[in-house]
Amino acid sequence: MAEQPDYFLPGEQLVIREGWRRDARPVHRAARVWAPARLHFNVIDFFRMRPMVPGGGGFGFSTTGAVGQVEVRLGGGPAAVPTARHLARLFGEMVGYDGDEVGVEVVHRIEHVHGGFGSNVTFNTAVLSALNALFGTPFSVPELWDILTTNFVENADASEGHVYWGMDTGVGEACLQYGGLVWVDQFARFVGSADTAGLCVVTAGGDTEALKSDRVRAFGQGGAHGIGDMDERESLVTICFDYQRAYHERVLDFLERRMKPALLRNDARAFLAHGWELNEVGTYRVMEELWRPDVVRGVMAVAREEGALYAMMSSAGPSIFAVADGRAAAERVSQALEARFGEFFSGFAVGEAGVKMRIDLLEA
């Protein structure tokens, strides 16, 4: 059994590197952030995934098919959501402001927590990016990405009001901050992105109870929230590490020789086309261990038959995505998947791929 994560109160265990403290003052009083869901596929190195140290890497892009919105105001705090309160105190400590004066209203949160749409990383990125905007952007985008990935926390399922150190690859933050199809390497370094103009994404939330394998059922929480704060670590040290030992060198070689050239020439379609072959050695194999393999294989087969450029489960699943060239093609893929697998997936949606988050400064 994996060791239980340590829970702590918001504002404790802040990580502030040398050079992150800034003399900044409020310029605006309120901001609303529109943040699309992030889709993440193929962790490059599970051995580098650990709390407090970003790593593992992978690829991803956002989708407007699922969107979160938060409103951040100076005054009216403290924030009710533990992670928001933690990040407000972190930012306040860096710029010399009382973080408990920050109010955070969740206008709409991305559903399917621990389901693969990045609801936690999207929320964290939105909150800290809004605070940065309110104080006149004292931190650059690369600095903000560094701060977020170094201080990635999640709300504790098992201890109300507490947070815990999550495991972050940095892919989600890059999707929202840079846009396009992003590549973050196993050392948590942003390699680059490819233009996704014209690409649309089909997404659907998976039914955890109907999809979970016997291995997921054996986890501590029984997979009640997909891969939750206890389950994620148990899966990492068993299924994911076993996969890593077997396929790591083959994956690195394939990425370097086939997929990186497509990214460097800014060709997202060619990159995604290689994804089907990547699935033979990539973390698609982990998805077959976590979730019902017959359904996982069926989804990929139908998506490909209907013309999808690529399809996969996002993050640790059980949500799925399929990328298509244009909305009409995406709608066709969506209809076929819902007709065949509607008993396992719901909330089918089609959105644009690779759109950055948007920050609107409001009148106080």
Image (cartoon, helix red, strand yellow):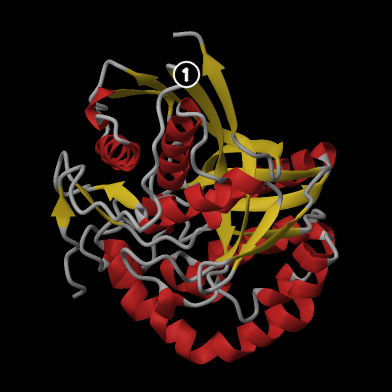
Q: Residue at x 72, y 81 (%)?
A: 256
Q: Secondary structure at mark 1?
A: loop
Query: Quadrant location of residue 310?
Result: bottom right
Whole-percent x and y of residue 19? 40, 54
Q: Residues within 10 Å of mark 1 (few under 14, many from 20)?
A: some
Residue drawn 37% across the image and 62% down it: 167
| Amino acid bearing label 1 | His
Asked whether, in this view, residue 34 is left or right of residue 207, the answer is right
Q: Residue at x 61, y 81 (%)?
A: 281
Does the image show residue 208?
A: yes
Residue furthest out toward the top:
363
Residue that mark 1 sits on: 28
**Along the line of sight, which residue is nearer the eye, 100 or 235?**
100
Picture layout, residue 288 above or below residue 312? below
Q: In what quadrant of the picture does the N terminus appear?
A: bottom left
Q: Is residue 244 left or right of residue 221?
A: right
**Vertical position of residue 126 compared to residue 141: above or below:** above
**Left or right, 43 with reference to 211:** right
Residue 124 higher or lower than 364, as above or below: below
Percent coordinates x, y for residue 47 in the rendering: 41, 80
Q: Quadrant of the C terminus?
A: top left
* Residue shown at the point (80%, 67%) measured from the top left: 264
Res. 98 image quadrant: top left
* Residue 343 image offset from top left, x and y in percent: 51, 45
Measured as percent of width and height from the top left, residue 231 is found at: 28, 63
Q: Nearer the viewer, residue 303 or 235?
A: 235
